Image (cartoon, grey):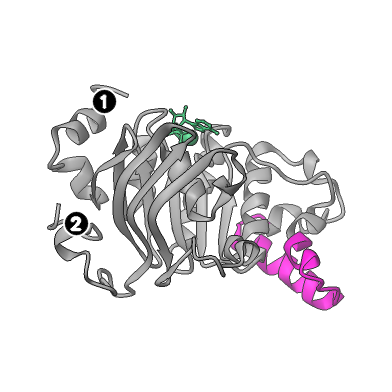
Amino acid sequence: MTEQPGTRTSMDRKMVHPQHGAEGTILDIDNFCLWYGLKQALFNNTISVEKGLVTALIGPSGCGKSTLLRSLNRMNDLIEGLHTSGEIRLDNQNIFDSHVDVIALRKRMGMVFQKPNPFPMTISDNVSYPLKIDGIRDRRILSETVEKSLQSAALWDEVKDRLKDNALGLSGGQQQRLCIARAIAADPEVLLMDEPCSALDPMATTKIEDLINELRGRYSIIIVTHNMQQAARVSDNTAFMYLGKIIEYGKTDTIFTKPRSQQTQDYVTGRFG
Ligand SMILES: Nc1ncnc2c1ncn2[C@@H]1O[C@H](COP(=O)(O)OP(=O)(O)O)[C@@H](O)[C@H]1O
Ligand SMILES: [Mg+2]
């Protein structure tokens, strides 16, 4: 798979700074394996994720998409019996190094989940939450960050007159954009999204997809989706996973129109999954 952008094999593993797009690489997943107890869920995955672009992870249910995504900001650390091998490097630093501050790592890599999970507090308190846990109390900084983050998440106009209302009163789509605003407020480099539209109606889904397109460039976005049309609409690069292994990785166009592997072809044409 040496010809595919962003994909490294044993032949080029010695490269330390693989440069792909104009901006280079943000994340190197290098021969990464993961076990839940005795059960291996990820097998020798090696890809480089390009900075500032949108990368989609696709594949049938249970193939390991969420497991891989949760590994990237070490959300899996909390699972008992879990172990890993290989490396994941963020800006060339292995995230599993003993001196890595996991809290700081998670700030650099915000996560948005399948089901919107706003906290049961006001809209503005949701967004300023990451700053408050950092001890920031300056009201001006807090309110500026709330406004900027809500604007970035394309939610400001809808909520600016009710910032003190409970976030749980928002629609599902608004709640999901609020969660994106909260992730953005922490000033991350990477946004990890695990099927962020699967609980939303088509209109709300379109808004999130538009938002992802707007955020491109400012953040490196990795989105898990089982919706292939969505992957085709929002992503620059796509990785197809099957049974814990990235089978093929490359430009989204190529993956959907001229995949090299028969398994990818079968999946993207809807023959299984
Ligand atoms: N906490 C867990 N403990 C044990 N096995 C798990 C856990 N989470 C996921 N798995 C297993 O790992 C595999 C990959 O799951 P997952 O990453 O959720 O796939 P996907 O997101 O592609 O649907 C599945 O076989 C699933 O049952
Ligand atoms: Mg999943």
SS state under label 2: loop
- In the rendered image, residue 53, in percent from the top left (x then y), is placed at 38, 62
SS state under label 1: loop
- In the rendered structure, the answer to whether residue 26 lies left or right of residue 152 reads left
- In the rendered image, residue 244, in percent from the top left (x then y), is placed at 34, 36
- In the rendered image, residue 210, in percent from the top left (x then y), is placed at 48, 52
Mark 1 sits on what residue? 270
> From this viewpoint, is residue 204 visible?
yes
User: Where 193 sits versus 59, above or below?
Assistant: below
- In the rendered structure, the answer to whether residue 226 lies left or right of residue 200 reads left
- The magenta region covers 128-155
95 in magenta: no
Disc 1/disc 2 C-alpha distance (Å): 28 Å
The residue shown at (26%, 71%) is 18
User: Where 249 sits versus 60, above or below?
Assistant: below
Q: Main secondary structure of the magenta part?
A: helix
Q: Earlier in the sequence, mark 1 or mark 2?
A: 2
Q: Nearer the viewer, mark 1 or mark 2?
A: 2
- In the rendered structure, the answer to whether residue 12 lies left or right of residue 176 reads left
Mark 2 sits on what residue? 9
